[in-house]
Structures are given as structure tokens and as C-alpha cells.
Amino acid sequence: MGIYWAGNTYPGRRYELQHKNGNEADPINRYSNALIWKEAGNVDCTTYKFSVKDLKKGQDYYFKDTAINSKGSGYPLESIDLVKLFVKPSAPEGPMSISDITDSSVVVEWKAPNTDGGAPVEKYKIEYELANTSRWIVAGNVDSTTYKFMVKDLKKGQDYYFKVTACNSKGPGSPLESTDLVKLIGRFHGINTTS
């Protein structure tokens, strides 16, 4: 997590950065427990950004920056609002179901991921790949409440793999991929292709 601030360059000054987990803070008075603040690091007086490491995904944090010189510490600059650490969503839940197989289309179904990464799923991306190739082609996208998609314009007699990826504000998560080849040979009721 990168934090930035504006400052002045004074000889002998450094900045001390701290963070505290907002999920552990007193909900009434976030300033009440000084022991919650944890040191994140120090930078010299010419640096106005810092990357805080080892934070927990999906948690909320406050940040504090304090200027320090030979006379002591100045007044800290604190984040007013909680900063939530978003991550990409997990893979959609399987098994992936492939149904209504025709000579040019299939219907792909899946379930929502176990975790959205702390930010709502915005869409699902559906892709297909011809067997013996390494090129995934985007078939389309659906909104976060849709768990079914008809992939069209496929070629009869070809073998395909399919995958579905949940996307949130941090980007695409891990995909749910079919493990069995799907051959387009005409109308077929359906199969589960992931375990």
C-alpha cells in the first residue's frame, strides 16, 4: 500500500510512518488506544512517499506520518478515513456446467466466487480456447448477478476449453477453467467440466 504526503525539506528531519488496523480500533474513539499503532518505517526528509508492507488483505487501516528532528516529534498527519485493502476476487465456484451444446454454441454456467476481495464483483468475463492452441478469446461479459452465458459463433467439429473470471475494481481474479474438452457435434444436454 503506497502512501504519499506533502512536506518541507529541513536538515536533520525524518518521517516516521505508522499504521493501525481499523478492524481492531475502538469504534467510538479511534485515538483512544495508542498501542494499536505499529511502526511501518522511516524515510529521510526528501522522501514523501512510502510503501507499507505486510498488511492483511481485505482489512481496513489508518495511517500516520510524523516529522521528527533533533528537537523531537511534530504533530502527526493522520488519514481521516479508513483505507480498505481490496484484492482481486477468488475464482468463480465450480463445477462449471456446459449445456445446450449445438454445432456452433454452448451455454456455460458457474457460481459466484467465495470471496469478492473486499470490493464487489463488477462483471464476469467468459472466454474460450481452441484445443491445441494457447490463445484465449473473449466471448463476452455479464454483470455480477448473472451466472450463465451462451457462447456463440463456434465452429462445428472443433474442441474447446472455456473459462470464467470474476472482476472487481482491482481487476480480474483467478479463473474457473473447464478441464475436459468440449466437442461441438450437435445438440447435447450438458456436462460438468470442472471438479
Image (cartoon, helix red, strand yellow):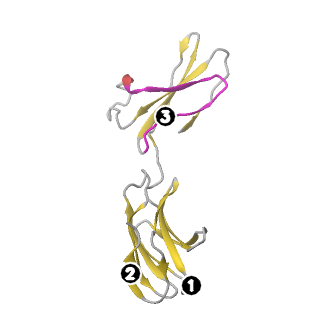
* Residue found at the very far top of the displayed protein: 71
Crowding near pointer 3: few (<14 within 10 Å), some, many (20+)? Answer: some
Q: Is residue 6 above or below residue 137?
A: above
Sooner in the amino-acid sequence: mark 2 or mark 3 = 3
Residue 16 in which image quadrant: top right
Marks 1 and 3 sit apart, C-alpha to C-alpha, by: 56 Å
Residue assigned mark 3: 79
2 and 3 marks in contact (CB < 8 Å) = no
Q: Secondary structure at mark 3?
A: loop
- Within the magenta stretch, is there residue 52? yes
Instruction: Please name whichever residue, 68 or 157, is drawn nearer the observer in this view of the structure.
Output: 157
Q: Is residue 183 above or below residue 16?
A: below
Q: Secondary structure at mark 1?
A: loop
> Which residue is painted at 35% across and 25% down in the image?
33
Q: Amino acid at mark 3?
A: Ser
Q: Amino acid at mark 2?
A: Gly
Which is closer to the viewer, label 2 or label 3?
2
Marks 2 and 3 sit apart, C-alpha to C-alpha, by: 53 Å
> Which residue is painted at 44% across and 37% down in the image?
61
| Dot label at residue 155 | 1
Please state the extent of the stretch shown in magenta in the rendering.
36-57
Sooner in the amino-acid sequence: mark 1 or mark 3 = 3
> Which residue is painted at 62% across and 17% down in the image?
13
> Which residue is painted at 38% across and 78% down in the image?
191
Residue 14 is left or right of residue 142, and the answer is right
| Dot label at residue 186 | none
Residue assigned mark 2: 190
Q: Secondary structure at mark 2?
A: strand
Q: Amino acid at mark 1?
A: Lys
Residue 174 % position (x, y):
48, 58
Q: Is residue 67 above or below residue 110?
A: above
